[in-house]
Image (spheres, grey):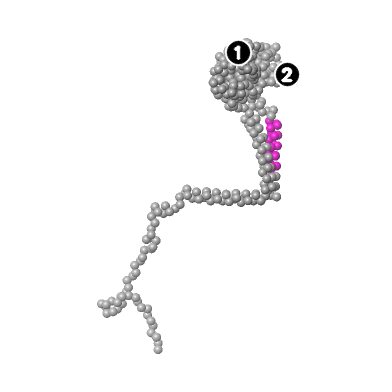
Amino acid sequence: MQARPRWPRRRGTMDQSSGGTLAAAPAPRRRRPALLACRIEPEAGLAARPSRPGLLMRASLAAMKSSLHDLRFGLRLLARQRPIVGAAILTLALGLGAATTVFSVVDAILLRPLPFPGPGSLLMLWERHPERPGDWRLTSAATYADWRLALDGVVDLAISEPWRPVLDAGAELRSLQGARVSPDFFAVLGIEPLYGRSFEADDASAGGARILLTYRAWQRRFGGDPQLVGRSVRLLGGGGSSLATVIGILPPEAHLAAPMVLGEVEVLAPLDTDPRRRPRGERLARVIGRLRPGAELEQARQRLAAVSRRLAAAYPDSHRDWAAAAAPLVELMTAPLKPALYQLTAGAALLFAIACADVAILLLA
């Protein structure tokens, strides 16, 4: 018996009005996606994201933890090789100590030789004789007056002479290292007193009645008394005793060994530079100068040569065969020491390189 084909039954509802026939089922409603039902507001989305400072803080903490981990790992490795680590530290310490010491000396002598503003423009001027080997780079006060007129507008000049007063401290006498200087001496060097004032033009006529003290002398000789400026002290010299008024204290960085004849000084007095009162052959003074802005050293040397020829013709007894010279003060201070310092620097650099090579060999062994 042949089976009848089974047709799929249509799903629907019974239409009662049509006698029981099936009616088509209504199409199902399309449902909205679930994502639209839970929309995220823009404010809520932005608040949910981590801020930029927060990300930077997390990254910094992660980097710090990694660095601490590496440090602990390195310390554990070094603790296992204590003899090698000790030898490496000692070798590096010796090399660094030598290099640091040499660099400190080079920095003080070559790189910063003069404690004055604008040291490159400072000059020293003197007279030299071909038959006199002892060159103290000196001249006379009368020649200084001629140079000052010839170099007007090119170089500002100042002069100093040695002076050895004795301080009468009541119970004892103390010898001082001093100098007499022209009133514009500190203006040429660019030094301002720490307390009080500097010399003025009319102070020279008073001789040693007004004095300036260096910071070292103020501390050593007078105990750093803040009330010393304006008071008088008794000085012995020149065959007598006189009272001198302290008008100022120089700052501690004012080291005057380079511009002076006899090195570092403690007390300074004004110098009378009137050429009519000083013999031309008395060469006991040291002259310093500062180039004016835009002026050249060669220009000053040419003017000095012209003055020397004129003085030799006018005063043959005191100026025959004498020639004027000028050179940068920095060059005169460092030139004798440059070869030795260069050799010392090369030796320190070689020693440090050997120390680094030894440490590398120890760690790789």
**Quadrant of the image containing the N terminus:** bottom left
Please name whichever residue, 134 or 241, is drawn nearer the observer in this view of the structure: 241
The residue pinned by badge 2 equals 132
Residue 52 against residue 270 in the figure, above or below: below
Query: Which secondary structure lies at badge 1?
Result: strand
Percent across and percent down for residue 230 are: 54, 18
Percent across and percent down for residue 270 are: 59, 16
Taking the spot 57% from the left edge, 49% from the top edge, the residue there is 68
Residue 80 shows up from this direction: yes
* Residue 99 falls in image quadrant: top right
**Numbered tag placed on residue 139 in the rendering:** none
Q: CA distance from mark 2 to mark 1?
A: 38 Å
Q: Main secondary structure of the magenta part?
A: helix
| Magenta span contains residue 342 | yes
* Residue 34 falls in image quadrant: bottom left
Name which residue type carries label 1. Answer: Ser
Please name whichever residue, 304 or 97, is drawn nearer the observer in this view of the structure: 97
Q: Residues within 10 Å of mark 1 (few under 14, many from 20)?
A: some
Residue 278 shows up from this direction: no
Taking the spot 65% from the left edge, 18% from the top edge, the residue there is 175
- Magenta extent: 338-357
The residue pinned by badge 1 equals 242
Name which residue type carries label 2. Answer: Arg
